[in-house]
Amino acid sequence: MSAPSYIEYSEGAESVPGAEASVRVTVSLLRIGGNRLQKFNPVTGAMTTDREIPSFRSTDYYRNGYALSTQVISDEDKIFRLINWTTFGTTSNFASRVVSNISFPMDTLGQSRDYDAMVCFVFRETNAWDANGLKPISGFPYVNITIDGGTGIRHGFRVIAADLMTGQWLYNNTYDDEPYSAAQMPYSQSCHIAERGKVAILMRKGYFNFYDSRTGAFLYQSETMDYPWDEPGFGAYNIASAYGMFYRGGYGGVYAFDWDDGSIVWKYKQTALSQYETPYIDENGVTVYSWNGGVQVADGKVFWQNNEHTPTQPYTRGWGLHAIDAFTGEGVWNITSQMNPGAIADGYLTASCNYDGYTYVFGKGKSETTVTTPDVAVPKGTAMTIKGTVLDLSPAQPGTPCVSAGSMATQMEYLHFQQPIDGLWNNETIFGVPVTLCAISDDGSYVDLGTVTTEGYSGTFGYAWTPSEEGTYKIVASFEGDGSYGSSQATTWVTVGPAPTAGGEVEPEPEPEPEPTPLISTELAIAIAVIAAVVIGVVAFVLLRRRK
């Protein structure tokens, strides 16, 4: 079974006439294909509806709850139908889903559709028949092809349009004169977009031609993209439209064109982190990264990845996924990895990674703030330390430090893509986030302690506070959140007691009377006594000898 590819928002029905619906909006994921209409619960993944539908040649889910499909009655007789039908409800009777059913001149919905003008388009190349009477070559060429004898020259293109309301052909126009010369052939059958009653087609010389959707009349030509890579048109096949502009990625940068006059509103480019590892340069000769692959636009941002038509293996170092401000062209964030932007909903972007095969989800994560103070009373006028943390609770990296917006790419690449903690080129520093501290006394008075910044590698913070008044204080630490994290707050308590009591003067103790100093030392007295004893002994011995 294929994965669902559409979202349906269905408003709840009132359970009692005149009353509000008990369920305001029901969200379902849709899959249309294989003769089935299937709905899934987006939270549990459980299938909630599985209904058989007719076999269609092509289907476009063109707005919430409604699809256009072409049905082939007879290929041989060229009998086709265009059916406008709804996906709302659970009925198994497809006829009850049909809004309109008309004859149609094509078996598909064409290569592009303008739902503002209700027109679909087919783009074809017009070629000279070769000398052998072979059919024209299909597909738009990248360069002019001239065969000896003047045969096989591509010299123009056609735009064919049909009305999606009436099922009638509107026009089948061939453009082969100025300003539609062979040198201005379309770049590719895929590089076009229709909206606002106009269809814009990328030409080989790096500009778009604009035509009226319903008449095919030429309106104007856009500004030309930059030489040497974008001017010939090299770049992505996908084009996206939003906010009165459409966006196209070239091999030198991403461009935004104004729908009203074709002017280039902005160009976004990324200088290569390592020169000469890619052949693409900008108009100033600076090595830049190329753009190809898919694009998504939502929440005022354009999401695009660095890529090219036939990338080398391994991929060019420094390629990444970029979020670009859709109005100004300024970079919002990027992460170095080969990621193709996918589904976007409720503030979250999915992206599949070619490096490891995982699907990643980008968006705001939850944060957790903690704060602690001394557990014992602190004397008034004595400094104390208020400590705490601000940590990321996102499922991919719970318990890691919250970091600043400027450090986010370095942090994510370190945590998930085995990059050095100081960046690929060892020149990055990770910074933390601001935390606001205040103290509220038991009488309600408020003390603004200021703002501290967490340490980027640990998520911790510390602040020295010397309270000037006694009382019990509630300490509040607040992280207000940013584009990466939701806000969080923590509180703790501390008691400030009286200052230490000051004592009186201390009388010095009287010094003891010194003992009399002996005339001779003990050692000398012992020596004298020993000598005296010896002398007495000698004298006694002499006297005894004389008596004999």
Image (cartoon, grey):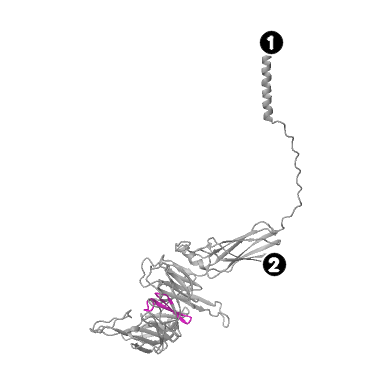
User: Could you tell me how far apart the alpha carbons at marks 2 and 1 are, in whole angstroms?
Assistant: 114 Å
- Most foreground residue, 374 or 264: 264
Q: Amino acid at mark 1?
A: Arg
Above or below residue 424? Residue 519 is above
The amino acid type, in three-letter code, at marker 2 is Ser
Quarter holding the C terminus is top right
Q: Which residue is mark 2?
A: 445
Question: Could you tell me which residue is drawn at 31 percent across and 81 percent down?
Answer: 144
* Residue 335 position in % (x across, y down): 46, 68
Instruction: Please give the residue where the numbered disc 1 appears in the rendered image.
Output: 547
Q: Residue 155 in the image: x percent, y percent? A: 31, 85
Q: Residue furthest top?
A: 548
> For the magenta stretch, what is the residue range?
230-254
Q: Quadrant of residue 437?
A: bottom right
Of the two numbered discs 2 and 1 on the same chain, state the one appearing first in sequence: 2
Q: Is residue 262 above or below residue 412?
A: below
